[in-house]
Image: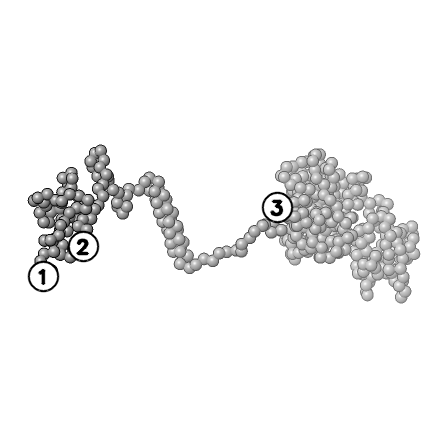
């Protein structure tokens, strides 16, 4: 190949075309197509390329672009070129940006106010509401819901001011039970405020000062009477609710238990009647204004009438709850109520004997007198005998004997254990109603 130019002996031509005309394109110039235009940029220096393969085709055929009617080349869109966002994209981007900015700002503000300390999640995950929140009928809330519509506030105006207590509906025709000391000293009239806040005038049907029970009658329809329980079936530790208007706070419910049974009470104001009853003691909160309201058991049945409280106060001070409250057993209160509604007065249960002012050394209550035709005499008891127990209840004070006798209905038979001299004996006594 020695200094010979490789292009001098090579016949260059366009594949499939005609040989170039004489005076063809000058070196370095692209060949001309049939239309007079440049067919390919590869023709410009193909023959002068010193590295050209002499056996390779002399031309690279590139198909010509189709010619449109306008003769203009078809526009080509660059996929990497920036495009103008649509309205939907603008709105979406703005919304996302605003949300992120707000969340970030809230998080930074909260972290700043909390001093940057992480706040743990409070409370456990909960699913269905717990059983207590569903207020089942046997729950305390269920019992309160059942009893409250039957409980009232009793207001009695007198020359000494207005006395306020509680009460509860015992009949659909309008009879209401309360304490005698709530209506005592009044004109025989009362204002009754119901659970829904409505009021009605009431008339005192009758009172029994010694049992501290009074009955009021109102003229009103649609009343819901309470259900009565059995106070003799109570046991120490049973749950109870006290319902009423303590310190003028109507519709108040407090909970507690039966603290003791047959707690003999002698109560009364100076110059007033002496009241005797074997009470139900409870630690449910009871205050002034609860008097006459119901004490109910776990089924919402009335088992007592709240009446008295004990409090550690000096003379002249207002007494308050210290967990020592006392209720009249409902079996006794119901019997007295029926007597008052039926006859206008209550019968008083007696044993037919008088007791001494104090107890006896070693326990027991001495009989200072026995009525010849009374229940005690009929059972063989005599003056001077010492009663040790009445139906199993120990006697330590004269109040014990009187209060426990009043608990029973006339005609009840009770077992009496007594001492005559040094001998212990037993007798069955059929209690009677006082002749008054």
- State if disc 3 and disc 1 touch (CB < 8 Å): no
Name the residue that disc number 1 marks: 2
Residue at figure coordinates x 22%, y 33% from the top left: 69
Nearer the N terminus, badge 2 or badge 1?
1
Q: Is 52 on the left-hand or right-hand side of 328? A: left
Tell which tag, 1 or 3, sits nearer the viewer: 1
The crowding category of the residue bearing disc 3, from other C-alpha atoms within 10 Å (few below 14, some 14 to 19, many at least 20), is: few
Tell which tag, 2 or 3, sits nearer the viewer: 2
Q: Rounded to the nearest whole Å, what is the CA distance between mark 1 and mark 3? A: 129 Å
Name the residue that disc number 3 marks: 249
The dot on residue 54 is: none
Q: Is 290 on the left-hand or right-hand side of 433? A: left
Q: Where is the C terminus found, in terms of image quarters?
A: top right
- State if disc 1 and disc 2 touch (CB < 8 Å): no
Residue at figure coordinates x 70%, y 37% from the top left: 223
Residue at figure coordinates x 63%, y 45% from the top left: 251
Q: Where is the N terminus found, in terms of image quarters?
A: bottom left
Q: Is 319 on the left-hand or right-hand side of 328? A: left
The dot on residue 55 is: 2
Q: Is 334 on the left-hand or right-hand side of 122? A: right
Nearer the N terminus, badge 2 or badge 3?
2
- Position above or below: 173 against 268: above
What kind of element bears circle 1? loop
Query: Where in the figure is residue 148, as x and y percent of width and height?
Result: 66, 44
> Toward the viewer: 124 or 401?
124
- Residue 185 falls in which quadrant of the image? top right
């Amino acid at each position: 190949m020695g200094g010979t130019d490789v292009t001098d002996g090579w016949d260059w031509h366009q594949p499939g075309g005609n040989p170039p005309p004489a005076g063809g394109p000058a070196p370095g110039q692209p060949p001309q197509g049939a239309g007079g235009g440049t067919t390919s940029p590869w023709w410009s220096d193909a023959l002068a390329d010193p590295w050209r393969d002499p056996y390779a085709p002399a031309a690279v055929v590139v198909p010509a672009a189709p010619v449109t009617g306008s003769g203009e080349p078809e526009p080509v869109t660059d996929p990497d070129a920036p495009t103008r966002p649509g309205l939907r994209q603008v709105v979406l981007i703005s919304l996302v940006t605003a949300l992120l900015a707000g969340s970030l700002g809230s998080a930074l503000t909260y972290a700043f106010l909390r001093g940057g300390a992480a706040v743990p999640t409070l409370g456990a995950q909960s699913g269905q509401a717990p059983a207590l929140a569903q207020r089942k009928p046997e729950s305390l809330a269920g019992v309160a819901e059942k009893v409250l519509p039957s409980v009232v506030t009793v207001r009695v105006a007198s020359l000494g001011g207005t006395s306020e207590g509680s009460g509860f509906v015992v009949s659909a025709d309008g009879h209401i039970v309360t304490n005698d000391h709530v209506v005592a000293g009044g004109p025989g009239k009362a204002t009754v405020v119901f659970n829904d806040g409505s009021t009605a005038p009431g008339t005192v049907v009758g009172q029994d000062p010694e049992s501290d029970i009074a009955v009021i009658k109102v003229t009103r329809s649609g009343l819901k009477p309470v259900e009565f329980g059995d106070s003799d079936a109570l046991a120490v530790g049973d749950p109870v609710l006290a319902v009423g208007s303590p310190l003028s706070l109507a519709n108040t419910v407090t909970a507690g238990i039966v603290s003791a049974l047959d707690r003999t009470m002698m109560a009364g104001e100076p110059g007033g009647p002496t009241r005797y009853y074997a009470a139900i003691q409870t630690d449910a909160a009871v205050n002034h204004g609860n008097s006459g309201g119901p004490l109910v058991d776990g089924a919402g049945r009335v088992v007592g009438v709240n009446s008295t409280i004990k409090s550690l106060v000096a003379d002249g001070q207002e007494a308050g709850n210290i967990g020592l409250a006392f209720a009249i057993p409902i079996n006794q209160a119901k019997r007295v109520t029926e007597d008052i509604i039926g006859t206008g007065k209550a019968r008083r249960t007696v044993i037919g004997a008088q007791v001494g002012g104090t107890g006896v050394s070693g326990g027991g209550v001495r009989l200072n007198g026995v009525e010849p035709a009374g229940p005690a005499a009929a059972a063989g008891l005599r003056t001077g005998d010492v009663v040790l127990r009445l139906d199993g209840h120990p006697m330590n004070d004269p109040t014990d004997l009187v209060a426990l006798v009043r608990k029973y209905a006339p005609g009840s038979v009770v077992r009496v254990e007594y001492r005559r001299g040094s001998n212990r004996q037993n007798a069955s006594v059929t209690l009677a109603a006082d002749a008054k």
